[in-house]
Amino acid sequence: MRYLYFILAGLGCAAAIGLRALTGAPWAPLVALIVAAIFLVLGLRESMAPARSYAAEDLSAEQEKELRRLLDAGQFGTAVKQVQLWFRGISYEKAEQIVHSLR
């Protein structure tokens, strides 16, 4: 959703430039810039939202199989890093707990 907000903010800026060039009216570009600013704030707010809490139950069967394969190969650190890649914003300690729960 944040990508949509950023795209709409960019389109609002482009519309402001186009409106200024085509109409010459001072209020039309201002309205477009205000709308663009609103979408920019929404996009930034969406980006800064805290990551949700994850647990071992959130792993799919395929992800669980991959982690077990890594653990069987003795690659605990790689398994933890893989969990961090799958779940955005998860801490190393929480990813470590998820991997430990699979043992």
Image (tube, rainbow, N blue to C red):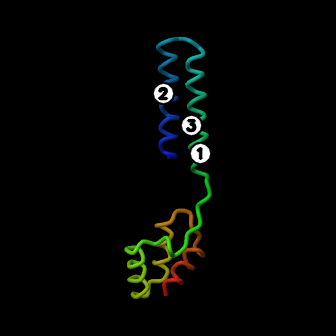
Category of crowding for the residue at label 3, using alpha-carbon neighbours closer than 10 angstroms: few (below 14), some (14–19), many (at least 20): many
**Residue under the point 59% across and 74% down:** 94
Residue of label 1: 44
**Label 3 sits on residue:** 39
Q: Residues within 10 Å of mark 1 (few under 14, many from 20)?
A: some
Q: Tell which of 39 and 56 is nearer to you.
A: 56
Left or right of residue 14, residue 93 in this image = right
On screen, 17 above or below 62? above
What residue would you read off at disc 2? 14
State which tag comes first along the sequence, 1 or 3: 3
Q: What type is the residue that disc 3 sits on?
A: Phe
Query: Could you tell me which residue is drawn at 52 percent across and 23 percent down?
Result: 16
Secondary element type, mark 1? helix
Q: Nearer the viewer, mark 2 or mark 3?
A: 3
Q: Secondary structure at mark 3?
A: helix
Please report whichever mark, 2 or 3, sits nearer to the chain's N-terminal start: 2
The picture places residue 30, in percent across and down from the top left corner, at 60, 21
The percent coordinates of residue 99 (x first, y second) are 51, 80
Q: Quadrant of residue 89?
A: bottom right
Report the Cα–Cα distance between label 2 and label 1. 19 Å
